[in-house]
Image (tube, grey):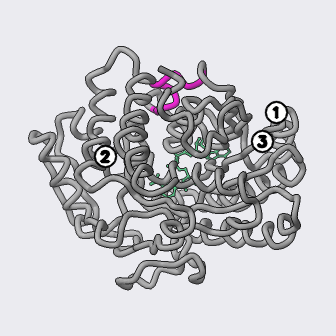
Amino acid sequence: MENLGLGMDLFGGIFKGKKVLVTGDSGFKGSWMCMWLKALGADVYGYSLPAKSPLDNFVTAGLSSKIHHQDGDIRDLESMKAFFHKIQPDIAFHLAAQALVIQSYVDPVDTFSSNLMGTVHFFECVKSTPSIRAAVNVSSDKCYDNKEWVWGYRENDPMGGKDPYSASKGCAELIFNSYLDSFFYTPGSCAVASGRAGNVIGGGDWAENRIIPDVFRAYMAGKPVQVRNPFSTRPWQFVLEPVFGYMKLAEKLWLSPTEFQGGWNFGPLDNHNYSVGQLLEKVQQRIPELQVESPELKVKPHEAQLLKLDISKAVSLLNWRPLLGFDQTVQFTVQGYLDEINPVSDLYEARLKQIETYSQNFLISSSNNTPA
Ligand SMILES: NC(=O)c1ccc[n+]([C@@H]2O[C@H](COP(=O)([O-])OP(=O)(O)OC[C@H]3O[C@@H](n4cnc5c(N)ncnc54)[C@H](O)[C@@H]3O)[C@@H](O)[C@H]2O)c1
């Protein structure tokens, strides 16, 4: 089951037999990406802080026995460099970050140091590891100066960010651009790009103050879920959608190093941005006993109400596009949590099953219609 027969040729087969290094492998997106890379035949190496909770996907899916993981801090350049130099990877992805808006108000210093210096250190490691031919930085839709207007942000819109997390992602993009223009612009140097995605959902995410983890924590406790901002619109995506984007980007960088450098948006289609309330209604259709409450908060930290990404560039140049509708996004997500809550015998296999379904029913069938 680990090497999904049908999926091996995906991404031009570039991951098969390659050493791929992923920072943030103990996190939500990183753990899914590592499982997918391994299923494609990659030799996967992870570097991150230890998983935060025994419920994290990395732990419950038993990822530490499937990939080569090293505990390490991205603020520690020497330790990170030593790992890169020891592994000599072919491809690197940077997903390690302090990834939570509310936590960035609690500890802005950790947020800025991990997200800014962590990005600097990632590119320093890439720069000093000649084996790496393609490197993808993972950022956020929150990197843009959000004017809360109805239009989607394009890759060349100005960076910004009011809260510390968003500002840290705007800064991380400036750091990425600086490294691109200063160190990775010559033919023969490593090809680098940065992927910006929105709110990602899927089984195995138990982070604090994210709506879907809050839903399943409340569900498990038999309590109503408390909702901060039911009217906030977010570009919800099942976790494999942006991960498909980051991996597609690596494929393009690998095959055509000078053409695809720069920033790329990976979000839902323009008419697929839904509110928190609509998301919860969809979850309730699958779990009718879930109760929802929306108390007024006395002090509300600033959080953007409307944020859309323009994905035209990735659709037309990378041949990436979101493959799931809203119903399917919620279906994959709810199933992913139920696999964990009503334990299946092997959660790693259950996660691979979702990767296989996404690959076969959506990715491969869509690429039969449009050339990959
Ligand atoms: N989940 C989302 O909805 C979402 C949306 C947009 C962007 N992103 C971005 O995607 C990336 C991955 O997000 P995620 O949801 O998987 O986050 P996560 O919190 O689940 O995982 C973060 C990972 O980074 C690691 N990490 C954090 N600080 C570190 C440090 N100082 N040194 C080493 N490792 C460190 C953690 O150990 C973990 O492995 C982040 O850059 C995040 O900002 C996430």
Residue identifier under label 3 = 90
**Residue under circle 1?**
87
What is the number of the mark on residue 107?
none
Tell me what residue is drawn at x 57 percent, y 78 percent.
Answer: 160
In this picture, is 150 found above or below 347? below
Q: Secondary structure at mark 1?
A: helix
Is the residue 130 above or below the residue 352 in the image? Answer: below
Say above or below: 310 vs 325. below
- Give the residue at x 81% y 51%: 126
User: Closer to the camera: disc 3 or disc 2?
Assistant: 3
Residue highlighted by disc 2: 214
Magenta-drawn segment: 56-64
Label 2 CB-ligand 1 distance < 8 A: no
Name the one closer to the observer, 9 or 83.
Answer: 9
Q: Is residue 5 magenta?
A: no
Q: Is residue 109 visible?
A: yes
